[in-house]
Image (cartoon, rainbow, N blue to C red):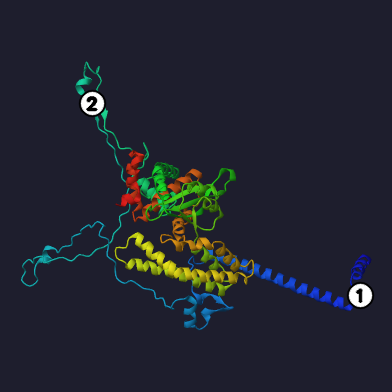
Amino acid sequence: MLMCHTVSMDATDTLPDDPALLKQLLAQRDAMIVQIKREAAERIEAMEQRHKAEVESLLRRFYGPKSERFDPRQLLLFGLMMDSMPVDQDAVEQEAGEPLKTRRIQHKHGRSKLPESLPRIAIEHDLSPEQKKCPCCGQERCRIGKEISEQLEYHPASFKVLQHIRHKYACKPCSQGCIKCDGKANIDIAEKPQQPIEKGLPGPGLLAHVITGKLCDHLPLYRQVKIYARHDVHIARSTLSAWTLATGELVVPLVNLMAQRVLKSRVIHTDETRVPVQDESLEGRCKSGRIWTYIGDRDHPYIVYDYTPDRTRAGPSRWLDQFKGYLQADAYGGYDGIYATGVKEVACWAHGRRHFFDAKDTDARRCTQMLSMVRELYAVEDEAQAKIAQAKDCSPVEADAIRLKMRQQNSTPILATIKTWLDAEQQLVLPRSPMAQAITYMLNQWDALNIYTTRGFLNIDNNAAERALRRIGIGRKNWLFAGHDLAAQRIATLYSLVASAERHGLDPQRYLTGVLARIAGTPVSQLEQFLPDRWEK
């Protein structure tokens, strides 16, 4: 107590005796306290908003809808849910930038026609001899026509055993003591076409079925083992895994050829996703590998996947080493070294929009304004696409010119409005709030977000790459992980063939069957015939 009293007396001794100065010090202290409280309140509010946004994002990720559709009536504006209020149609239309439309679900009635490509099996239904007699005169009636109705039936897939019979030939006279050949029979046997897996059990169709089942239908190998067992065909899962690896190794030259074509594109879309890979050094845990996608333009229409054991910039830098065009991607810093080599950066408006959408629960007013302006940009793209569709015999070059002209006339003024809005609102939002982060992201990417208006062949967003990775995300939920790095790389190789085939509307099962039946005996110089666009023709 004495020590505290002494300290208090020492602190008091430093105060001035002038009452006016004491009042001034007290006023300064009170102002400082108010300032500290206000800054603390702002920090707490920003933290609460950020944490709330993170929680909402996680809940929406795991339990909510994946769509980012925007309806101004569903946003929380000024603390009131507009869904519970009478709708002011004029205000909503002005805010949304388009007329308010009531969506009605269109139900298609009637049975659709069955495809003509399906084989037809005729089943005759005729009258019995007694029924053919006329009930009036008893004479046999003549046939005057028929009525055909179709029924769709399913026959389960079946296995077949192919017996490769190689005929042998020998010279009988020589085998009986020919002087020239010293009693040799000169035996010769017919050659068998080279198989995908030499001396292996599976045929091309079975390999294609295993790969299509896993990569297209997302069936893990252990499920396929159960399906085959129902047909009394018992194949170990390890065997199916070995077949997959061998097939992936077989088609590497073809996928490399596709990659060379993609690198010749004017613009490449790229993105990456996580893939768990088993690692013995982690004691039963999986490491996070990465599968990258690279999508070529319309003149090089291939989708190529590549695997890297980590997310470092070395993966895309190695793959894009010879590329000098436009690269459309997200804001991942690993691409900065690639842009430094002369590759032009094209940002994604879907990514920029998503940050504002995620902030809608903490700052609904600004979110509404920004999403409405972004919607105007996409409306220009839709209008340009409709105009191109109306033009008869419109070449790709003419389509690019139409799209570029409409962007310069309509999108550029909208972008100027967005930039002015961003600069003004950046000064008003809390520094660490989700809205501030969304504004900062868009301003940092501003030049790359505007570059799509300078070329007609560029896209407004990178959704093509995200769609290409969706198949891996769905498959990952089923087959869970890859056994090792090589297995993950071979899976990426096979995904390249499957995705490129589907891009051209090909049946992956038939395409892979045809390719695997012939590629083993085809020289590398003739692999172009197996490219999906060549195969389609």
Say above or below: 343 vs 391: above
Pick the residue in front: 291 or 62: 291
| Mark 1 to mark 2 CA distance (whole Å) | 128 Å
Going from N to C along the chain, the mark reached first, 1 or 2, is 1
- Give 394 or 358, whichever is nearer the viewer: 394
- Image spot of residue 517 (x, y percent): 32, 43
Badge 2 marks a residue whose secondary structure is loop
Query: Where on the picture, by quarter, is residue 108?
Result: bottom left
Q: Which mark is residue 17?
A: 1
Say which amino acid is labelled 2: Ala
Q: What element carries label 1?
A: loop
Judge whether 105 appears above or below 220 on screen. Answer: below
Residue marked by disc 2:
170
Mark 1 burial class by Cα count in 10 Å: few <14, some 14-19, many 20+: few
Left or right of 457 in this view: 152 = left
> Where is residue 29 drawn, in percent x and y?
80, 73
View extreme (top): residue: 179
| Mark 1 and mark 2 residues within 8 Å of each other at the beta carbon | no
Quadrant of the image for the N terminus? bottom right
Of badges 1 and 2, nearer the viewer stands 1
Judge the density around disc 2: few (<14), some (14-19), many (≥20) Cα neighbours within 10 Å.
few
